[in-house]
Amino acid sequence: MHLKVTTTLAMKKLFYILGLIGLMLCAACKHGDEFVIKGTTSQTRLNGNRVFLVPYGSKQIEDSIGVDSVVIENGQWEFRGRGEYLARVTIGKHMRYGTQDLLVVTEPGGVINVVIDSVSSGGGTPQNEALQQWKDKMADHNRIAAQKARQLRYLRETGDTVYANALRDSLRQFNADFRQEMQNMAKLLKPGPAQDLLLQYYGDTK
């Protein structure tokens, strides 16, 4: 009799544990594709205003997914949703001056950290870390390319064709090397919005 009671209690305990595991698995399935974007800003003037998460691409894409928005409180906000897509984080038009829009991937599996300021930044998940790396490298590239272009114009205006031609070739190679670097970066990314964006700008990796 004692053995039968003990066995029954053990079975009940086992069923209880299995039930808890089942609930945990269901919860994981339910929230596994959810993305979380946590945003901050140091600009106190933005408190009480809305920040928008706008699907990036054609008007058809924007209409099919829809635009989300939340109010900034104490320099913070949060977006939650489902689906993986490229989006633009932006402040409402009337308060946007002095802030920089930011492209993010609504990537599930971690918290996406976003800072909106005069120079905005993002990260926290693999694709968003890659987008930030691309942004930083592109800023450096554009700065150096602009310097070379100004110097090239000066050489041409002063009639120094020998150095102008050499600098022109250097600038072309500089741009080609950057394009190749971005293609190599795209190769390392898993298929998704971040890789698609790099390929859109810099061509096929083949």
Image (cartoon, rainbow, N blue to C red):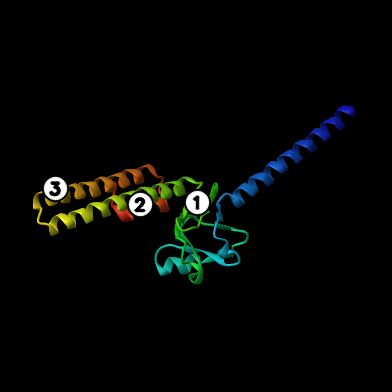
Residue at the farthest front position: 158
- Tell me the distance, in whole angstroms, between the alpha carbons under discs 2 and 3: 24 Å
**Residue drawn where x is 32% and y is 47% of the image:** 182
Q: Nearer the viewer, mark 3 or mark 1?
A: 3
**Residue drawn where x is 87% and y is 32% of the image:** 5
Sequence-first disc among 2 and 3: 2
Sequence-first disc among 3 and 1: 1
Above or below 138: residue 89: below
Q: Which mark is residue 166?
A: 3
Q: Amino acid at mark 1?
A: Glu
**Residue drawn where x is 9% and y is 53% of the image:** 161
Pinpoint residue 130: horizontal percent, then vertical percent.
42, 47
Could you say which is closer to the camera, residue 100 or residue 186? 100
Pinpoint residue 85: horizontal percent, then vertical percent.
46, 57
Q: Which secondary structure, mark 2?
A: helix
Could you say which is closer to the camera, residue 176 or residue 195? 176
Which quadrant would the N terminus be assigned to in this image? top right
On screen, residue 88 versus residue 149, left or right, reads right
Q: Where is mark 2, residue-wise?
A: 139
Q: Where is mark 1, residue-wise?
A: 107
Q: Which secondary structure, mark 1?
A: loop
Q: Nearer the viewer, mark 1 or mark 2?
A: 2
Q: Amino acid at mark 3?
A: Ala
Residue at the farthest top position: 3
Q: Which secondary structure, mark 3?
A: helix
Q: Amino acid at mark 2?
A: Ala
Residue at the farthest right position: 1
On screen, residue 81 versus residue 127, left or right, reads right
On screen, residue 115 versus residue 198, left or right, reads right
- Mark 2 packing: few (<14 Cα in 10 Å), some, or many (20+)? few
